[in-house]
Image: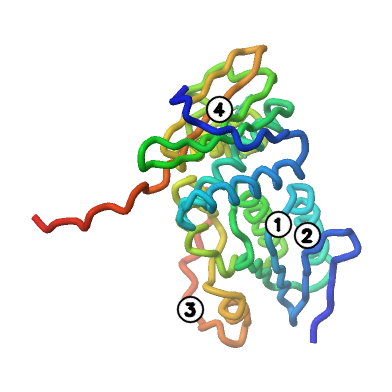
Amino acid sequence: MSAPIAGSSGTQVPVLKLGTVLLVTLQGDLYDEAAEQLQRNIGEAIAASSVTGVVIDISGVEIVDSFLGRVFAEVAAHAKLLAAQTVVAGMRPAVAITLVELGLTLPGLRTALNAEEAMRLLSPASTPLHHSPARQESP
Amino acid sequence: MTDTSGRVTACLPIRSDMDLAWVRQHVRQAAAQLGFGLVDQTKLVTAASELARNTLVHGGGGQVESTVLETGAARGLRLAFSDQGPGIPDIERALGDGYTSGGGLGLGLGGARRLVHEFSIDSRPGEGTAVTVICWTAGAPRPREESR
Ligand SMILES: Nc1ncnc2c1ncn2[C@@H]1O[C@H](COP(=O)(O)OP(=O)(O)OP(=O)(O)O)[C@@H](O)[C@H]1O
Ligand SMILES: [Mg+2]
């Protein structure tokens, strides 16, 4: 079904590869150290195999502060360099409300209601052939 | 700062990222016990996480003192973060969104201020920084709002 990718490092964050999508499920409170370790693991996993998308499931996360928000943003930026998209799934309403007031907008991150919807967003089969906006190279 | 009716419930060290997690857990429990709703709990824990991380990263470590306040029907939680670090030379600038002296986003201090009801900061270059925040519960159930 799925194979654990990273896990030897002592973090208890499962990183699974489903097809070409990495599914990362965060649970509870993450130490800063563990979050940074996770960021490295995801980076390695993307580099090591053909990954087209990363789903970070945060339905089990009670708070997102600027540190964790930055980890998400950096994962997304890293993934983008390797042509993979990142979706943050399952953010709790209380967390979303708090992030707005904190001023953390998570630019470059797509969101989805839950992990399934995120997987659907990232699966090539179901992505409608939308017209990509006219190519604009910034000067 | 405010009234003396407070009851200090905990004084927690802030010396490592594990301490940050412990501070978050303590604040979550204290807020839940006081009857804060889920959104308010989340705001307070997030503010505490930002301030505790500043204490650790910028202040070189310190502590937080947690106090339960009771004034009439209103109940609140006061969190006083303090360190003996380098202090903040320009507080107004540090409170502004986007200002960071390190690799941060510069959101922590200003964001934490927006997430709580009362916020005060005292910082002296070379001596340290103290940031105190208070959140109040909604208090006694409000009388039904009358239509005007
Ligand atoms: N306890 C402290 N001691 C010394 N300087 C501090 C302290 N707290 C904040 N500062 C200063 O204020 C600046 C702004 O703090 P703020 O929390 O807003 O941003 P940040 O910590 O740099 O980034 P982040 O968005 O990750 O929190 C810091 O970069 C730092 O220079
Ligand atoms: Mg900060």
Q: Which residue is mark 2?
A: A43
Are discs 4 and 2 located on one and the same chain? Answer: no
- Image quarter of the N terminus of chain A: bottom right
Front residue of B11/B82: it is B11
Q: Are dots 3 and 2 in contact, CB under 8 Å?
A: no
Left or right, B143 with respect to A68, comes to left
Amino acid type at image mark 3: His
Residue at (44, 37) in percent of width and height: B70
- Mark 3 vs mark 2, CA separation in Å: 28 Å
* Residue B13 location (% of width, % of height): 73, 33
Q: Is residue B136 above or below residue A90?
A: above
Ligand 1 within 8 Å, label 4 CB: yes
Residue at (61, 30) in percent of width and height: B81
Amino acid type at image mark 1: His
Front residue of A75/B134: it is B134
Of the numbered discs in the image, which one, if any, rests on residue B131?
4
Q: Is residue A18 above or below residue A49?
A: below
Q: Of the residues tagged 3 and 2, which is closer to the observer?
A: 2
Q: Which residue is mark 3?
A: A130
